Image (cartoon, grey):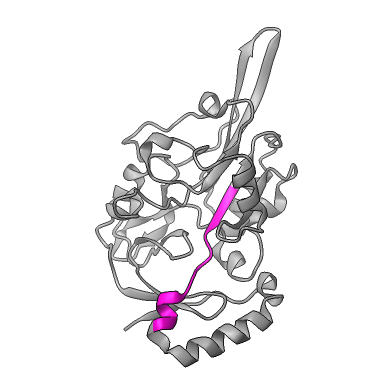
């Protein structure tokens, strides 16, 4: 039995009403199979502007509030570091979250999804804002056609393989959510880009509360979106965390001072401790 993953139409789509009507009529004329093949999903992405981040942690607080993230754990953090030599010393801030990777060039599957014992799972159907349908596979960890990498706690077995496989260290166990298939264990947890808000045409909570407007969210497949224009303007395709991992992350950084690698402190690989936000 197929499941339908259908986002609500939000304010982003209101002005596209006429186009949706025409597209719907065309899809009916050519048949559902052709309509499914031709459907195009958005590709959600985020740009972090390091020129604007002030380290206020409004993003971490709003994320915890919006998603009921447990005490001491975070879905997004801000790393900070003082660098340079006296008297030219600077303090930099680096916001980090799940990169919602596209996956490597060979199979387009992110590393966290690839190691999940419950993937590939049930066949699902994603309905685009204009009514098109795209088939894909679910799992305890899976990637939707719109690029969001998500967790289904009901299918999770609490093995931690996805946590260990993430090169960015942005996954952790949620002590208050049981792994659906092994209730004696904890389910994995991470940023889901506030998928319910996105489905209703609203920016993720961290973006909405960013005081410096350092976080920009949008559809990379829409050339007129601010995200797409910033990626093109600043040539951000490779301005990502750990580019050598080859995961094709879709969180990009505007970094004119080339301090991304200086600021980034990776979590020790193999440690399954929770993702924390510490102010040194």
The residue drawn where x is 67% and y is 53% is 226
The residue drawn where x is 68% and y is 42% is 214
Direction top: furthest residue: 86
Direction right: furthest residue: 211
The residue drawn where x is 61% and y is 65% is 197
Q: Is residue 129 magenta?
A: no
The residue drawn where x is 38% and y is 84% is 33
**Residue 264 spot, x, y in % from top left:** 51, 29
Direction left: furthest residue: 117
Left or right, 157 with reference to 23: left
The quadrant the C terminus occupies is top right
Which contiguous range is marked in magenta? 34-46
Q: Is residue 62 visible?
A: no
**Residue 235 spot, x, y in % from top left:** 57, 40
Q: Nearer the viewer, residue 179 or 242?
A: 242
Indicate the quadrant where residue 38 lies. bottom left
Q: Is residue 263 visible?
A: yes
**Residue 182 spot, x, y in % from top left:** 28, 62
Left or right, 27 with reference to 21: left
Q: Is residue 36 magenta?
A: yes
Image label count: 0
**Residue 42 spot, x, y in % from top left:** 53, 65
The quadrant the N terminus occupies is bottom left
Indicate the quadrant where residue 269 lies. top left
Q: Nearer the viewer, residue 48 or 181?
A: 48
Question: Can you say whether 71 is above or below 144 in the image?
Answer: above
Question: Can you say whether 85 is above or below 41 in the image?
Answer: above
């Amino acid at each position: 039995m197929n499941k339908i993953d259908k986002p609500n139409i939000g304010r982003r789509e209101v002005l596209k009403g006429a186009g949706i009507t025409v597209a719907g009529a065309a899809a009916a004329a050519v048949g559902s199979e052709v309509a499914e093949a031709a459907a195009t999903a958005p590709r959600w992405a985020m740009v972090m502007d390091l020129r604007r981040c002030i380290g206020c942690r409004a993003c971490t607080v709003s994320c915890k509030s919006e998603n009921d993230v447990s005490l001491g754990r975070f879905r997004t953090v801000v790393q900070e570091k003082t660098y340079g030599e006296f008297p030219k010393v600077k303090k930099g801030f680096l916001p980090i979250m799940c990169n919602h990777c596209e996956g490597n060039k060979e199979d387009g599957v992110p590393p966290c999804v690839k190691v999940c014992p419950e993937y590939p799972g049930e066949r699902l159907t994603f309905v685009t804002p204009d009514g098109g349908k795209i088939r894909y596979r679910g799992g305890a960890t899976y990637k939707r056609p719109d690029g969001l990498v998500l967790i289904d706690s009901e299918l999770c077995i609490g093995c931690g393989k996805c946590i260990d496989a993430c090169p960015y260290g942005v996954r952790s166990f949620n002590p208050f959510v049981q792994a659906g298939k092994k209730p004696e264990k904890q389910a994995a947890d991470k940023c889901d880009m506030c998928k319910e808000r996105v489905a209703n045409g609203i920016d993720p909570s961290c973006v909405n509360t960013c005081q410096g407007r350092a976080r920009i969210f949008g559809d990379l497949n829409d050339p007129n979106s601010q995200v797409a224009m910033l990626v093109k303007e600043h040539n951000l395709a490779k301005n990502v965390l750990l580019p050598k991992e080859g995961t094709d992350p879709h969180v990009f950084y505007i970094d004119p001072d080339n301090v991304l690698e200086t600021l980034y402190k990776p979590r020790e690989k193999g440690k399954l401790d929770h993702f924390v936000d510490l102010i040194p």
